[in-house]
Image (cartoon, rainbow, N blue to C red):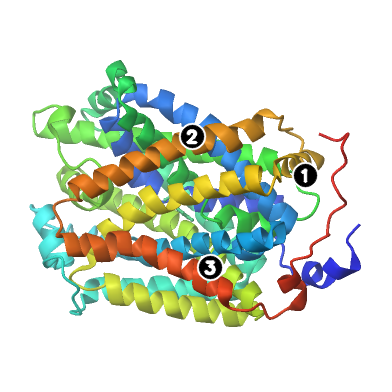
Amino acid sequence: MATAMAQPAQESREQWNHQAGFILAAIGSAVGLGNIWRFPGVAYSSGSGAFLIPYLIALLTAGIPILFLDYAIGHRFRAAPPLAFRRMAKWAEPLGWFQTGLLFVIGIYYAAVIAWAMSYFVFSFDLRWGDDPATFFVSEYLQVGDPVVSTTPVWGVLIPMALVWILMLVVLLLGVANGIGKLNMIFIPLLVVIFTALVIRALFLPGALDGLDAFFTPDWAALADPNVWIAAYAQIFFSLSIAFGIMITYASYQRRKANMTSSGLVVAFANSSFELLAGIGVFATLGFMAHQANTQVSELEGLTGPILSFVTFPKVIAEMPGGNIFGMLFFASLVLAGVTSLISIMQGVSASVQEKFSIDRIKAGLIVSILMGAVSLFLFSTTSGLIALDTVDMWSNNIGIVLSAIVMSILTIWIMRRGRELRIHLNAVSTFKVGPWWTVLVGILGPVVLGFMLVQRVITLITEGYEGYPGWYIGVFGWGTIAFVFIVSVVFTLIPWRRKEFSDAQFNAWPPVKENRS
Ligand code: PFF
């Protein structure tokens, strides 16, 4: 029973072709570089097998509930974050732009990592990195300089990065169903096949079982360390792509009668399964590495982040029979996982711009890809790329996203008081029903745990700095990132909406929630 007023916006909205299109796209967004290069190392350094406990608790108490919150907002208010929040309360629009700003920042460095993986896919043919992959990665490939802003281009990065941006542009222009839907329909099954082959190969390497032993043997004492819990919550947020506005955007293209919570459970389960699979593959491989070096996995270094993928793995690959193929499979997985996440980021930004300025998908796609591509190439294809990337990543994920999740939960549940309405909405369309516990998790537990996490992080970053980088650098690329996102929130909110019905923020596309339906 849509009211006449909401009709124009409704009619022209893009839609997924089918439920599977949405689910695959949401999995594509969730399964990304974070699963392959972040999870195994974080789990290992945070209690190994014992980490699964905080990880599962974080998934159940914050991950899935906030994923449902994102879905409910997107599906009920049928818009990208700025308009979705505005439809809940006019003054809430800046939160939407805050999330969009974060996406902008993450997108521009995420593309660089995909570009590195593309280069390394090619380098795998002849194991180009030789016997010293660390020096090769930092000095020969990236040509890292001091942490200063440099304008010297690194062609080996710039060319694949340009290709990534062209791909993003093409997929965005093709639209939600024909571009993003189809891309995920091909890339996700391909990723699963390639990655499974890789893990099976890894399990047959000598020493693989010792690697698994290191990965799974629980260190129970770690559970008493608050940092381990912080790491678990941070991992879940980044990994599920929640509180970034992505899932709001994707859910807004769902049909009206779409089973939201059940899809959410499928997405969360698939993401965590992939994460676990990556842990098994990575640690089986590291077991082999330790075996070759006649040492223990615990003695190895460089087990997380870019160093794991671009230094440690190349080293193992070079020692392995059939290493070229293993290398190609590994870097192809990174590219596939990365591209399906990056496209979700791009759609989030593009949809926000499309709605605000009332321009069509093609124009918004062109503007956003060209702008983000240009900034991304300028900042990250130069000799200062690695350090800038590392700093921006730290601040956007550990401060930006946590702040966004806290503010979103508190505003939605406590200030705008939309908790009950959103819960009833979810239950009206879904088979898996959410009880009042959901409001408690989103409105109380989430903000408390996340608030604690945020304060801890801010204190550590202020008192200890980061990686010994100079203060001015941390100011510009670290805190500057957060300041930039704040400025985006204010400036874009101040720009007037082109369409009157958006500016009025009246939105009555759904029947009002009934008291007796929950
Ligand atoms: N979830 C992705 C990963 O695990 O790598 C990363 C990501 C994608 C984060 C999209 C945020 C986002 F909006």
11 lies above or below 366: above
**Spot occupied by residue 422 in the image (x, y as percentages of width and height):** 73, 44
> Along the line of sight, which residue is nearer the eye, 478 or 352?
478
What whole-number distance in Å separates the C-alpha atoms at marks 3 and 2? 29 Å
**Spot occupied by residue 30 in the image (x, y as percentages of width and height):** 50, 48
- Residue placed under numbered mark 1 in the picture: 425
What whole-number distance in Å separates the C-alpha atoms at marks 1 and 3? 26 Å
User: Toward which corner of the image does residue 246 lie, by quadrant?
Assistant: bottom right
Q: Is the residue at mark 2 in contact range of ligand 1, meaning its CB lies under 8 Å from it?
A: no
Q: Residue at x 39, y 58 (%)?
A: 335
Q: Badge 3: how crowded within 10 Å, few (<14), some, or many (20+)?
A: many
> Along the line of sight, which residue is nearer the eye, 223 or 372?
223
> Looking at the image, is mark 3 or mark 2 nearer the viewer?
2
**Spot occupied by residue 393 in the image (x, y as percentages of width and height):** 33, 56
Q: Secondary structure at mark 2?
A: helix
Q: Residue at x 21, y 49 (%)?
A: 307
Q: Residue at x 35, y 32 (%)?
A: 280
> Along the line of sight, which residue is nearer the eye, 138 or 499?
499
116 lies above or below 70: below
What whole-number distance in Å separates the C-alpha atoms at marks 2 and 1? 25 Å
- Residue placed under numbered mark 3 in the picture: 349
Residue 503 left/right relative to 357: right
> Looking at the image, is mark 2 or mark 1 nearer the viewer?
2
Residue type of the residue flagged with mark 2: Val
Q: Badge 2: how crowded within 10 Å, few (<14), some, or many (20+)?
A: some
> Along the line of sight, which residue is nearer the eye, 19 or 332?
19
- Residue placed under numbered mark 2 in the picture: 448
* N-terminal label among 1 and 3: 3
User: Toward which corner of the image does residue 473 lie, by quadrant?
Assistant: bottom left
Q: Secondary structure at mark 1?
A: helix
186 lies above or below 283: below
Q: Is the residue at mark 3 in contact range of ligand 1, meaning its CB lies under 8 Å from it?
A: no
